[in-house]
Image: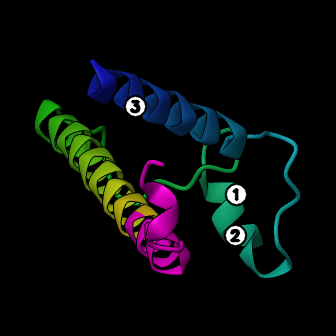
Amino acid sequence: MGYLIVFAIASAVGVAVYAVTLREEAQPLPGLTDLQSQTPAGTYVSVAGGKPDWQSRLTGLLGLFVAVIVGAAALAAVLYISFQSVFRLLGSLAPHGGASSGGA
């Protein structure tokens, strides 16, 4: 369930970034006026020619899924190593039980 939440958030952020980059009011760069005139409405320049087919869309979806999993695993590893280092440092600084830990 956690993976689906992370995947949904990552997808929503990706859609938001895609929507923000398609702004119509962008000023053309001085050297790219001829390229700007060739594009359809907006400032989006297509990298590949033609419409994407189902195979390229599924490949992109799989790539997003793998990137989310790898990112989550890397974050988990970094957090684990960080907390383990802090706990070992605090454990080495803490006084060890001696005469004060016993009873009367």
Question: If you read the primary sequence from the N terminus, does the residue marked by circle 1 or circle 3 appear first?
Answer: 3
Marks 1 and 3, Cα distance to the nearest angstrom? 39 Å
Please name whichever residue, 79 or 58, is drawn nearer the observer in this view of the structure.
Answer: 79
Please name whichever residue, 61 or 48, is drawn nearer the observer in this view of the structure.
Answer: 61
Secondary structure beneath label 1: helix
Amino acid type at circle 2 is: Asp
Q: Nearer the viewer, mark 1 or mark 3?
A: 3
Marks 2 and 3, Cα distance to the nearest angstrom? 41 Å
Residue 75: x, y in percent?
39, 57
Q: Which of the numbered marks, if any, corresponds to residue 63?
A: none
Task: For residue 5, say whether it is visible.
Answer: yes
Secondary structure beneath label 3: helix
Q: Is residue 15 above or below residue 49?
A: above
Furthest-front residue in view? 104
State yes or no: residue 33 in magenta. no
Amino acid type at circle 1 is: Ser
Question: If you read the primary sequence from the N terminus, does the residue marked by circle 2 or circle 3 appear first?
Answer: 3
Residue appearing at x 53%, y 72% in the figure: 94
Q: Is residue 57 above or below residue 102?
A: above
Disc 1 to disc 3: CB gap under 8 Å: no
Disc 2 to disc 1: CB gap under 8 Å: yes
Q: Quadrant of residue 8?
A: top left
Q: Which of the numbered marks, if any, corresponds to residue 34?
A: 2
Q: What crowding class fits label 2: few (fewer than 14 Cα within 10 Å), some (14-19), or many (20 or more)? A: few
Marks 2 and 1, Cα distance to the nearest angstrom? 5 Å
Give the magenta-colored segment's residue range: 84-104
Residue appearing at x 58%, y 40% in the figure: 18
Q: Nearer the viewer, mark 2 or mark 3?
A: 3
Mark 3 highlights which residue?
Answer: 6
Mark 1 highlights which residue?
Answer: 37
